[in-house]
Image (cartoon, grey):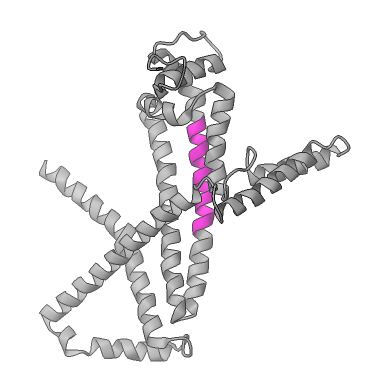
Amino acid sequence: MNGFLGELGKKLAERWVALLALPGLLFLAAAAAAHTLGWVDALDLARLRARVEEWAAEPVLRSVGGGALTVAAVLAGSVAAGLVAAGLGRLLSRLWNLPGRRPPASWLAGARRRRSRRAKSEADDPAATARQVGAAIARADRVSLVQAERPTWIGDRLHACRVRVETSYGLDLDAAWPRLWLLLPDTARTEILAARQAYDASARLMGWALLHLLLTAWWWPAALIAAATGVTAWSRARASVAAFADLVESAVDLYGRELATRLGHAVRDDGPLTVAEGEAITTTTRKSRWDPDSPLAD
């Protein structure tokens, strides 16, 4: 047991260093450079080196107690910055998934909807050649796999997952997913969790980009760091959310009939889940008093 607890503590410490401490230390280094150099001498490495040597020569750092306190303060600062970045990441994750009912999100959603409809109309043009139709379909799918309704690509990709499942199977994914999750094998759960964790990590990385963007007020190279970090975070977020949505849809495709069986609904011996079977699952899992087919209907 002691060995297990020790190994668990080691893994938690490694994860803590990777998620909070190390990125936080890099941010503190950028903050120190911003404080020392400013805008005018932003790239004066000699001045930065001289300032670091002055800090290192401080009497308080030469004592054991002073050095320990300094290390503790730096680690605390890095962890605090990491917590702020994680909080910003969670906020951004929510913003990326806004439904877009109110301005300014509704303006972005409207622009994406018009792009989606325009590409769809081009693909449906009877006078278009096969090559033009293929290009229009590709453009429409790049905007959204169904008609765009959300302010961001990420929001529309997750929205498309729900729409495609409901249209194909009559299944309310939000209501059925907790039950379906309990039926999935460990391998499927691992893949889905890995995709979700990658998405969370990309949102957290975008939080670091915002923190570095704040340093731009004192040190212009921070804008380059923020831009590179932000582009990387957005690219990873799109890739991870696409993988997550594909895996969720795949779970419904592969295990939807098993869920219907476990819930006591009669299903065919073969073939995919039917719309009638999906609607029966939805009625059972929603348990809504507003559904006339539900036993809880008023």
The percent position of residue 15, horizontal first and vertical second, equals: 29, 54
Q: Is residue 149 above or below residue 249?
A: below
The percent position of residue 54, horizontal first and vertical second, equals: 28, 91
Left or right position of 100 against 85: right
- Residue 288 in magenta? no
Q: Is residue 85 above or below residue 99?
A: below
Identify the residue at image location x=52%, y=66%.
228
- Location of the N terminus by quadrant is top left
- Residue 242 in magenta? yes
The percent position of residue 212, horizontal first and vertical second, equals: 43, 70
The percent position of residue 179, horizontal first and vertical second, equals: 37, 25
- Location of the C terminus by quadrant is top left
Q: Which residues are magenta?
A: 233-249
Identify the residue at image location x=23%, y=68%.
76
Q: Is residue 30 above or below residue 125?
A: below
User: From this viewpoint, is residue 48 visible?
Assistant: yes
Identify the residue at image location x=27%, y=64%.
79
Which quarter of the picture shows residue 215? bottom left
Left or right position of 292 against 105: left
Q: Is residue 199 above or below residue 22?
A: above
Q: Nearer the viewer, residue 176 or 200?
A: 176
